[in-house]
Amino acid sequence: MVCYNKNMSDSPKVIVYSATWCAFCHAAKDYLDKKNVAYDDRDVESKPEYMQQALDKSGQTGIPVLDIGGDIIIGFDRPKIDAALAAHKLA
């Protein structure tokens, strides 16, 4: 599922690896929504290749994993998310 803000480009630079049952995943996506940041939501349960991508990027199996312009953030870590968004001029 790709979530876009109407003011964003067609290719989001943010990927969120998540699962429907994960409260921290929902919190991370809600936070990005409030900041009007477009992201590609990749459900690791629906497609095993998404879990493998998250594992390859983060080195572990926990979620959420956020890829913000190539910066990998494990978990819902607001200061790191804000820093990565600012560094990539996404918020």
Image (spheres, grey):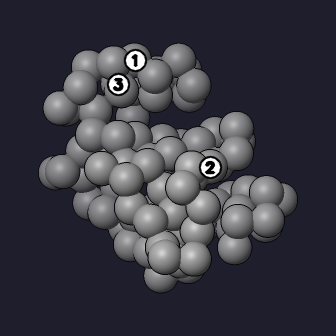
Instruction: Please give the name of the residue rendered at 43% of the width and 49% of the height, measured from the top-left corner.
Output: 40
Cα–Cα span, label 3 and label 1: 4 Å
Say which label, 2 or 1, has the lower sequence index: 2
Cα–Cα span, label 2 and label 3: 18 Å
Instruction: Please give the name of the residue rendered at 53% of the width and 17% of the height, measured from the top-left corner.
Output: 56
The x, y position of residue 29, in whole percent, is 40, 64
Say which label, 2 or 3, has the lower sequence index: 2
Instruction: Please give the name of the residue rendered at 31% of the width and 63% of the height, measured from the top-left corner.
Output: 26
Cα–Cα span, label 2 and label 1: 19 Å
Can you say whether 36 is above or below 73 in the image?
below
Picture quarter with the C terminus: bottom right
The dot on residue 13 is 2
Q: Residue furthest bottom?
A: 34
Can you say whether 4 is above or below 59 in the image?
below
Pointer 3 with pointer 1, Cβ within 8 A: yes
- Tag 3 residue: 51
The x, y position of residue 23, in whole percent, is 26, 60
- Tag 1 residue: 52
Residue 12 in view: yes
